[in-house]
Amino acid sequence: MIFTRRLTMQFWPALLEAMTKQIKMMKPGAAHASLELVQMEHEASVAQMTEGGDFDAPYENNVDTWPLGKEALLPDNIQFHVHAKAPFRLEFLLVGGKSFEVAMGRRLLHGFCKLFQDAVERADWGFNLEMPGASNEAAPAGLLN
């Protein structure tokens, strides 16, 4: 699949918004802290995947089937389907009218986000994709949680 710079700049904020919406639906009492909860889930999921070796596995290029054909897929639009107790679903609408959907649990979704962030960094498009609250700035002195 090919992501253009333009699509990436539209996709990332919409993805974060959808992830935040899912947190608000799952934990309505903590809706005020949904951005922080997304960040905490992201850090925990990436740590688990890193410890489990999921990010160290080499790329496997032994594909036997191509359900949408061997040509590169160029998304024109991406729709998010978010529910409180269902996997996060991304529907990729492709140039030419085809579409496909990917469903991901929260851990896999955060792994996808990490790989997507790394890919954009390597693409050197002049911007990085940040998770909400991922600032390296120290908290102001005297700030209590």
Image: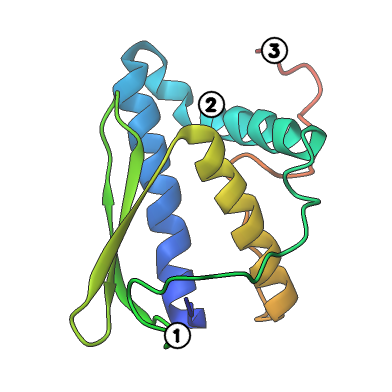
Going by the numbered disc 1, the residue's amino acid type is Ala
Going by the numbered disc 2, the residue's amino acid type is Leu
The residue sitting at 48% across, 77% down in the picture is: 3
SS under mark 3 = loop
Labels in figure, total:
3
Q: Position of residue 113 (x, y in %)?
A: 57, 52
Q: Quadrant of residue 101?
A: bottom left
Say few, some or many: other residues with alpha carbon within 10 Å of mark 1 (under 14 / 14 to 19 / 20 or more).
few
Q: Mark 2 or mark 1: which comes first in sequence?
A: 2
Q: Position of residue 59 (x, y in %)?
A: 71, 64
Question: Which marked residue is nearer to the observer: mark 3 or mark 2?
Answer: 2
The residue sitting at 56% across, 51% down in the picture is: 112
The residue tagged 1 is: 72
Q: Residue furthest front?
A: 64
Q: Position of residue 70 (x, y in %)?
A: 43, 84
Say few, some or many: other residues with alpha carbon within 10 Å of mark 2 (under 14 / 14 to 19 / 20 or more).
many
Q: Position of residue 47 (x, y in %)?
A: 75, 33
Going by the numbered disc 3, the residue's amino acid type is Leu
| Callout 1–callout 3 Cβ contact below 8 Å | no
The residue tagged 3 is: 144
The residue sitting at 18% across, 81% down in the picture is: 97
| Callout 2–callout 1 Cβ contact below 8 Å | no
- Left or right placement of residue 40 versus residue 8 in this view: right
The residue sitting at 78% across, 16% down in the picture is: 142
Whole-angstrom CA distance, mark 2 to mark 1, is 35 Å
Q: Mark 1 or mark 3: which comes first in sequence?
A: 1
The residue tagged 2 is: 37
Whole-angstrom CA distance, mark 1 to mark 3, is 50 Å
Q: Quadrant of residue 88?
A: top left
SS under mark 2 = helix
Q: Is residue 20 above or below residue 27?
A: below
Residue in front for this viewpoint, 62 or 2: 62
